[in-house]
Image (spheres, rainbow, N blue to C red):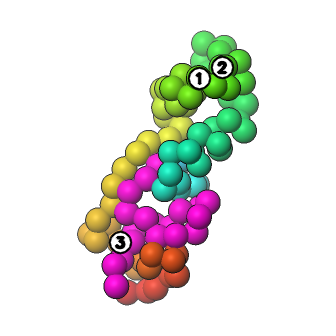
Amino acid sequence: MEKFARRCDITGRGMNEGYVFGDGELCFAEREDLIRHLKTLDWENADGKRSQDIDEDDVDKLLEFFYNEDMYYYTEWDFYDIDDEYYDAEGNEYTL
């Protein structure tokens, strides 16, 4: 059985790479799911620019805005990143 370090908060499936939002509150396996979540946020940066003012179709600017605000990052996990719990492909949780 392949082991996964995290579980996607949208699909519920195991993942070893993807996007982490905030301080780990949410994990997204797919870029599109991250984008959908970011579009729901109304965030103002230190310069007074608001995320809701970005053209909804300009995904690159939206991603750049939130990345520069340290709101998300992309990462990969491997077996050594697994603490006490891990997941299978369907997102079922197991304990070491």
- Report the residue at 48% width, 56% height from top: 29
* Residue 79 vertical placement versus 33 (above, below): below
Mark 3 Cα shell of 10 Å, populated few (<14), some (14-19), many (≥20):
some
Q: Which residues are magenta?
A: 1-20
Observer-nearest residue: 83 or 75?
75
Tell me the quarter of the image containing the N terminus.
Answer: bottom left
Disc number for residue 92: none
Q: Nearer the viewer, mark 1 or mark 3?
A: 1
Q: Nearer the viewer, mark 3 or mark 2?
A: 2
Check contact, mark 1 vs mark 2: CB within 8 A: yes
Percent of width and height locating residue 83: 37, 74
Q: Nearer the viewer, mark 1 or mark 2?
A: 1
Observer-nearest residue: 82 or 27?
27
* Residue 8 vertical placement versus 43 (above, below): below
Query: Is label 2 in a helix, a strand or a loop?
Result: loop
**Main secondary-structure element of the magenta-colored stretch:** loop
Mark 1 Cα shell of 10 Å, populated few (<14), some (14-19), many (≥20):
few
Task: Note whether residue 2 is visible.
Answer: yes
Is 95 situated left or right of 54 in this image? Answer: left
Tell me the quarter of the image containing the C terminus.
Answer: bottom left
Three-letter amino acid code at the position of disc 3: Ile
Three-letter amino acid code at the position of disc 1: Asp
Q: Is residue 14 magenta?
A: yes
Task: Note whether residue 51 is visible.
Answer: no
Percent of width and height locating residue 86: 42, 77
Q: Which residue is mark 3?
A: 82
Disc 1/disc 3 C-alpha distance (Å): 36 Å
Three-letter amino acid code at the position of disc 2: Ile
- Report the residue at 48% width, 31% height from top: 67
Total labels: the figure holds 3
